[in-house]
Amino acid sequence: MCHKLLILTCFLAVSAQAQPNRYFVFFKDKAGTPFTITQPQEFLSNNSIARRQRQQINITEADLPVNPTYVQQLKELGIATYFTSRWWNGVLIETESYNVPAITTLPFVDEVLLVAPGQKLSSGRTGKIKRKHDTTDQPLANSIQLAQLGIPAMHAAGKSGEGISIAIFDSGFQGVNTAAPFSLLNTDSRIKHTFNFVGNNTNVFTADDHGTEVLSVMAAYTAGTYTGAAYKANYFLYLTEDVSSEYRIEEFNWTFAAEKADSAGVQIINSSLGYNTFDAPTMNYSKNQLNGNTAYITKAARMAIERGIIVVCSAGNEGNSSWKLVTPPADATGILAVGSITAGGVRSSFSSLGPTEDGRIKPDLVAMGSGTVVIRANGNIGTTSGTSLASPLVASLAAGVWQTYPDFTAQKIYEVLTQSASQATSPDNFLGYGIPNYEAVVNYLREPEPEKNWLVFPNPVVSNTFNIQLDEIINPVQVTLFDSKGARVSESTLHINWQNNPFEYDITALLSGLYFVRVVSGSREATFRIMKQ
């Protein structure tokens, strides 16, 4: 008690006019917490527990809430406390800098980290967008960005995100509660939860429209004019940043939101955010820290992934800058970091590159981020460019794939999206594993027929083309045709992917008759007999 009174006397002895700052206080342990891992229903929802159980993920001490007596002791010393973090085991506070040494000496405190100057809980974002344009309405204005990922086929299969819970972390969702293209979200009560970590309230329909545009790519709907890629999913909207400034507090706001999404049972997080430089240069990250284990937000993303959540993020818009590389949390292992391409499938020059410091391929996937068609806060259709708009397209695809294969783990979803993408057999640090596609995923997962792992069909060939279907793709694929006398009449070296498997082979130039087709892929080889009529 005397120790506590001494600290309090020190607090009161200094001028009250000093400006408060924001700090995160890390606790040493969770000893004495009233919560236990054997009774997770006291701090996790049934959906959150079920998500872990389906994926055989254990609940650990890291999931336990902080010891409330530690927070209470800070309050008793006159410290303003805000959001606690289970994963970081600590609490966000606002206090004057002269109080920090005394707080550090408390027996349960491990570290006090300055996360932002000033009293306002605020944050910012780098590389938000590249360009914006308004457009006039046209039939299904966003058809190109959907078609690139096979979203129309996904919708035709009855997979539009029903039953999937998606959290979006952004800087504001102006107009989502009033604009007509978002009306289905509201009338169907599919906005399940909102919270503003900047203003410490539930109003997220304020501050900025970047989140509005990101959400529109996924959830807006106007019949015949605009279709969000996962327009029937459930959404959790979290405002984690303030565009007026940029400090490390953004990374902690992200963590608070991720923990809230986790405890609510969310399955997918979309985060069109990236952090490498801050208003306080001492907080900046360097390129050699892109190792998947340094930035606070990167480590928080890993914590979410380890709890069975698919985390999708923008790769960054640094391709034309001196930085060039992806920005945290895109360096996290297992995160779907999404780069940008044009409507023609060419890499956008601003899209951030890989690799990570430890040599991993980045970005993981790409989608249309140049001239992406969005819905504005006023309900109008427009276009915006940036990897921020490519990320929600892939998150929507992930929702449809998980809806199609509900027994898959988050890790399995990551695998099938990357390994079935357009350049899965030869990934690089420009496009990663390439463009994902719903039909490619289905083809990748289709079980081959017994004893017919490679197929050539139809046979006889009644037109000028036949199909070759492989159960495994190792590029290049060599296809050689011989006539009935053994003479070589056609030869091609092909680079194929799961989207065009089976692939179509043209024999228009050949006469009717008997032919032999030799297919070589990697170390495997097979010869088929076909008849062209």
Image: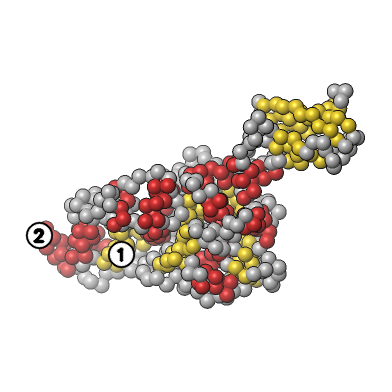
Q: Secondary structure at mark 2?
A: loop
Query: Where does residue 530 sit, x and y in percent of width and height?
Result: 81, 32
Q: How many marks?
A: 2
In the image, is residue 359 above or below residue 112? above
- To which residue does mark 2 refer? 1
Locate the N terminus and report the quarter of the image it occupies: bottom left
**Which residue is found at the position 21% from the left and 65% from the top?**
75
Percent from the top left, x then y, of residue 246? 44, 62
C-alpha distance separating marks 2 and 1: 25 Å
Quarter residue 375 falls in: bottom right
Question: Which residue is farthest right?
Answer: 511
Say which element carries label 1. strand
The reply to whether dot 2 and dot 1 touch (C-beta < 8 Å) is: no
Q: Give above or below for 338 relative to 424.
A: below
Q: Quadrant of residue 532?
A: top right
Mark 1 lies on residue: 82
Q: Position of residue 286 (x, y in %)?
A: 46, 48
The disc labelled 2 sits on which kind of residue?
Met
- Residue 393 lies left or right of residue 29; in this view the side is right
Label located before the other in sequence (2 or 1): 2
